[in-house]
Image (cartoon, rainbow, N blue to C red):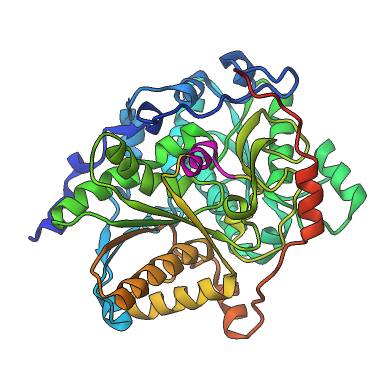
């Protein structure tokens, strides 16, 4: 039995702790503010939406946070996830680079999202919560929370962004198979949804709108909480099992990444692969070049403003300082629905401000070019979101070839595309377009950012 197989069969390799980047930051991230008072929020402000265990993780500066054994017990179904070296892709690219990818598509839901869905469902069950309400873009988060809810006996309702609801019927079917109720957003079930539909009956929806609907429902019922699949600190914390495992696996391969690549929409899978390595660097370890790859049609890191903004369109959420395109911004309906968010995780935004990561934006056809090339070399069909990371890794490998240098490149293949084949059908049929956002709409959305005096 080779070392890799033994690693995958050894349950002791499943991390026992999540890594908290906030413990190692050279400068703390800006505070989260109450939308009414503009003062830092306290635990009581978040209690209507989240259980106290998650609220404490949100504000913690402890480096390691123990993973509860019931959560590790579920993780055993798919963790540890494999780390592969893309040797066939290397040969096709004729690159001296060594390309590795961490494959999160082996989870029951087919992506990295159960890494946080399971602990969120666990902590809510412990707190006596009967129902969780959430939003989803491409459906990977919604299906993951539906899966986790079924394990812990929690009812789940998902507001799915309308354009993805129509594009991805099999994601909807997966949620329903796990027992969740899936509603197209904007909907007539909430005040915020009805307000949007009154302005435009055929609105394609956005994650900001879907968040508003989910938060509105959760705030109305004592037995119901809200769950979020990205952006917040505790969500990014749970995803660090990816990078923790990757560090051990790279050590087994007697290698260490020079470059780390992740796709970014809200920031969860990117944080999962990158934060443990960035933390090691901040503690005096080896420097890594970290690339955040985002869609050119929703470029929060490369075109957004670093400012306080609402996480949702109806302005029901706290104010966080992040790279944002404006909470009213509606991205065009490109296929990587999981990356169609107007903002970026505050911790990821903070890292860019500190100069610890770099951002790059790509149009979707270039990403699908890379995804097809990867699938034909490595055999795995990536999700549209993951294609952005594949594109970034391939471009870095080509740069190594052109410069005649050998670098180690690690990227997170955060999910498979088995429920996204309509996107590939459109690609092969020449129907996939490089959609552009409306510059005037972006200007209006940024002009409408709240005026906030940052606390001293």
Question: Residue 176 or 66: which is nearer the viewer?
Answer: 66
- 380 displayed left or right of 29: left
Relative height, residue 56 to residue 293 (above, below): above
- 1 displayed left or right of 304: left
Residue 377, given in percent of the width and then of the height, sits at 34, 79
Relative height, residue 57 to residue 84 (above, below): above
Question: Residue 408 or 155: which is nearer the viewer?
Answer: 408
- 67 displayed left or right of 237: left
Q: Residue at x 28, y 70 (%)?
A: 86
Q: Residue furthest bottom?
A: 429
Any part of residue 138 in sight: no
The number of callouts visible is 0
Answer whether residue 352 is magenta in the image.
Answer: yes
Quadrant placement of the C terminus: top right
Any part of residue 116 in sight: yes
Q: Residue at x 38, y 81 (%)?
A: 376
- 251 displayed left or right of 348: left
Residue 366, given in percent of the width and then of the height, sits at 53, 75
Residue 423, given in percent of the width and then of the height, sits at 59, 73
Which quadrant of the structure image shows residue 133? top right
Relative height, residue 443 to residue 447 (above, below): below
Answer whether residue 67 is magenta in the image.
Answer: no
Magenta residues, as a range?
Answer: 344-353
Question: Residue 180 or 288: which is nearer the viewer?
Answer: 288
Q: Residue furthest right?
A: 198
Q: Residue at x 38, y 66 (%)?
A: 393
Which quadrant of the structure image shows residue 240? top left
């Amino acid at each position: 039995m080779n070392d890799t197989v033994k690693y995958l069969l050894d349950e002791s390799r499943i991390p026992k702790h999540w890594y908290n980047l906030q413990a190692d930051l050279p400068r703390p991230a800006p505070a989260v503010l109450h939308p009414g008072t503009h003062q830092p929020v306290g635990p009581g402000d978040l209690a209507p939406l989240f259980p106290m265990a998650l609220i404490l993780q949100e504000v913690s500066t402890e480096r390691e946070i123990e993973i509860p054994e019931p959560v590790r017990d579920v993780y055993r179904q798919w963790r540890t996830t494999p780390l592969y070296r893309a040797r066939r892709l290397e040969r096709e690219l004729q690159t001296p680079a060594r390309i590795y990818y961490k494959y999160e598509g082996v989870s029951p839901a087919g992506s990295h999202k159960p890494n946080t869905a399971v602990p969120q469902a666990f902590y809510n069950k412990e707190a006596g919560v009967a129902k969780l309400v959430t939003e989803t873009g491409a459906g990977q988060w919604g299906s993951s929370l539906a899966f986790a809810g079924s394990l812990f006996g929690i009812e789940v309702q998902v507001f799915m962004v309308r354009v993805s609801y129509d594009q991805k019927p099999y994601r909807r079917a997966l949620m329903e198979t796990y027992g969740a109720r899936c509603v197209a957003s904007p909907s007539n079930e909430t005040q915020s949804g009805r307000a949007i539909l009154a302005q435009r009956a055929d609105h394609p929806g956005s994650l900001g709108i879907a968040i508003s609907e989910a938060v509105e429902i959760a705030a109305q019922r004592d037995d119901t909480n809200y769950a979020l699949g990205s952006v917040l600190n505790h969500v990014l914390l749970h995803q660090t099992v990816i990078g923790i495992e990757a560090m051990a696996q790279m050590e087994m391969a007697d290698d260490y990444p020079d470059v780390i690549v992740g796709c970014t929409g809200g920031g969860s899978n990117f944080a999962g692969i990158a934060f443990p390595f960035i933390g090691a660097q901040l503690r005096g370890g080896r420097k890594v070049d970290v690339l955040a790859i985002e869609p050119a049609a929703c470029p929060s890191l490369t075109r957004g403003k670093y400012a306080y903004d609402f996480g949702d369109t109806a302005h029901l959420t706290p104010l966080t300082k992040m790279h944002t395109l404006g909470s009213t911004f509606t991205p065009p309906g490109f296929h990587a629905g999981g990356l169609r968010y107007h903002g970026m995780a505050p911790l990821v935004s903070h890292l860019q401000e500190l100069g610890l990561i770099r951002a790059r934006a790509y149009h979707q056809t270039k990403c699908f070019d890379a995804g097809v090339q990867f699938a034909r070399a490595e055999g795995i069909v990536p999700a549209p979101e993951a294609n952005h990371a594949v594109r970034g890794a391939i471009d870095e490998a080509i740069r190594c070839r052109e410069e005649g240098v050998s670098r180690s490149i690690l990227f997170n293949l955060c999910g498979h595309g088995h429920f996204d084949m309509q996107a590939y059908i459109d690609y092969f049929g020449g129907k996939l377009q490089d959609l552009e956002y409306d510059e005037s709409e972006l200007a209006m959305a940024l002009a409408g950012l709240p005026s906030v005096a940052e606390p001293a």
